[in-house]
Amino acid sequence: MSYALIVAETRRGIFEERNLDSIGICALLGKETAILLPDGQYSFNEKLVDSIIRVKADEEVFLNPLNMTAIIEKVSEARGRPDLIVFTHSSSGAESAAYAAGLFGFPVITDVSGYDKERGIFFKSYYSDKLFGEFKTTGGATAVLTVRSGSFKEFAAEKAAAPREEVVEGITASDSRTFVEYVEEEKTDIDITKADFLLSVGRGVGNKDEIPAYEELAGLLKAVISGSRPVIDKMWLPKARQVGTSGKTVKPKVYLAMGISGAFQHIAGMKDADCIIAINKDAEAPIFQYAHYGIVADMHKVRDALKGVLKG
Amino acid sequence: MNILVFTKRVPATQEEELRLINDGKDVDFSKLPFKVNDWDNYAVEEAVKIVEKGGGAVTAVSIGNTESDEVLRRAIAMGAKDGFLVEVDQALHDPFARGALIRNFIRKESIPFDVIFTGVQSEDDQFASVGGILAALLKLPYVSMVVGIDSVAKDHMVVRRELEGGLQERVRVTTPCVLSIQSGINEPRYVSIMGIRKASKVERKSFKGIEYDAGKESHIELVKWVYPPKKGGAQMLGGELPDICKKLMEILKEKGVYQ
């Protein structure tokens, strides 16, 4: 039986919304779809899939590539090898996808954001969305994909019949990699998700000495300062100020992005802001595709000019 | 502990215009500067930090053309003992092909290691797959998105991996293993031109990828590159700086975030 296997991503009991993109691409490909879930009760529209395969394993065991490959083997023994294995493009999804591809000798394409059905072509980002690569798999083996969130969910559609229920049991958790505990971010007094107006700085800021002048500008504008990954990685701003998938998802009234090129992981964290204003000296920066207003300019010059205006 | 760390030379594309040539079969890199892949820089630093504390040696390996020697010199300047170049004429776009080449190289040359580090991804193709494929091909445990190494014991390590929204997961992994290092895990040391010059005197070994069946195990094909789909895009505010500032302030007032 030909089918697509979706590895659901759950995090502490929550069915992540980006699983809908995994379901969507399977619908777009016209595949019969089975979704794999760890132990627990998950709230989602079950009619979107043909089968639900419940794995008798805790979420932390399930989201471990060493165990996930064992689960996929069991599923393949029971119902035949899938044509397609789909993961979300996320920390756990990308980790298990690559490992599964390596172990089974399957082709893998990650961060897939488009599919051309007629040509059988998958689109994937290169150079932080400055280019896209058109890929196809060669040979007939099962393809492993990770899917970019927001790319395919509109293709997910309800099936005529309620999903069939299947169970996978007898998974022995690997002892070479084991879950110890979750580590929460340190609590801080600032919560950027509550701000109406964020002034966010990115890689373009160039060096740490420039940061205080942006903090001053944020103060004058009564905005809260935040940053993209490169600025946080360099410890120029604290982790609690990070906007993006590994940081915070924000929805301010205004998001003023200065020197942020717009890597997808950043966009995913701010695309729902009411108004996005991007300042970047690179006219081709991907962020201009998502912004409502764009300014092609040197961010430092705009900063200094704005400060001049505000200080009157 | 002996650590094998992979480092890649990539084009610096931030703020650079990328131009497609030959009907999208190639990207014109002729005017672009090149640099070490950011993630690999963190991986090299992490490896060097571990051996500085607990002993052992770091070996840096790069897959690429002869110019990739520059990222090996850089790794040596940071503290790696050896630099190995596995030379390939053409870029291997399929991460599976790269993983398979590395496995073949490690096995054929009997490269010793306790742990392998890769960057989570490379800035160019962002596949984030080579580490996982390599681990599976070597039948070793794997952890990706590593943002902290809490402890290193004789037969295992305790590491933290990044999840979403500021959440991390602490895991215990037995060695030997493959870890993919996430950016921000440390503060990579500064590398001076003098340091690189000194590192140039350390002999780097060069190997021919063809000896390890480079490119033979490939499962996907890059048909061509295309420019990103246009989504409508922003309304651009042009003019001189004072005009831009005026328009910007008007928008902020209109949106009610500045009075």
Image (cartoon, coloured by chain):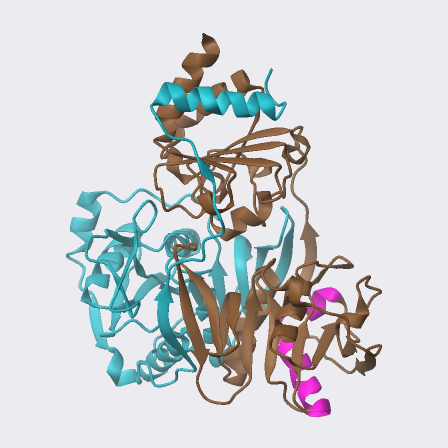
Q: Residue at x 45, y 19 (%)?
A: B246
Verify whether residue A60 appears in magenta.
yes
Chain displayed in cyan: B
Location of residue B222 (image quadrant): bottom left
A91 or B59: nearer the eye?
A91
Dividing the picture into quadrants, the one containing residue A80 is: bottom right
Asked if residue A119 is positioned above or below residue A297 in the image, the reply reads below
Name the residue located 41 percent from the left edge and 13 percent from the top edge: A308
- Chain letter for the brown part: A
Magenta residues, start to end: A59-79
Residue at the spot 65% in from the left edge and 67% down from the top edge: A155
- For the image, the number of numbered tags is 0
The x, y position of residue B31, in whole percent, is: 20, 53
Is the C terminus of chain B in the top left, top right, bottom left or bottom right quadrant? top right
B208 or A257, which is in the foreground?
A257
- The residue nearer to you, when weighing A115 against B132, is A115
Does residue A175 appear in the picture of this structure?
no
Residue A204 at x, y percent in the picture: 38, 37
- Locate the N terminus of chain B and report the quarter of the image it occupies: bottom left
Residue B178 seen in this snapshot: yes
Please identify the quarter of the rendering in which residue A7 is found.
bottom right
Secondary structure character of the magenta stretch overall: helix
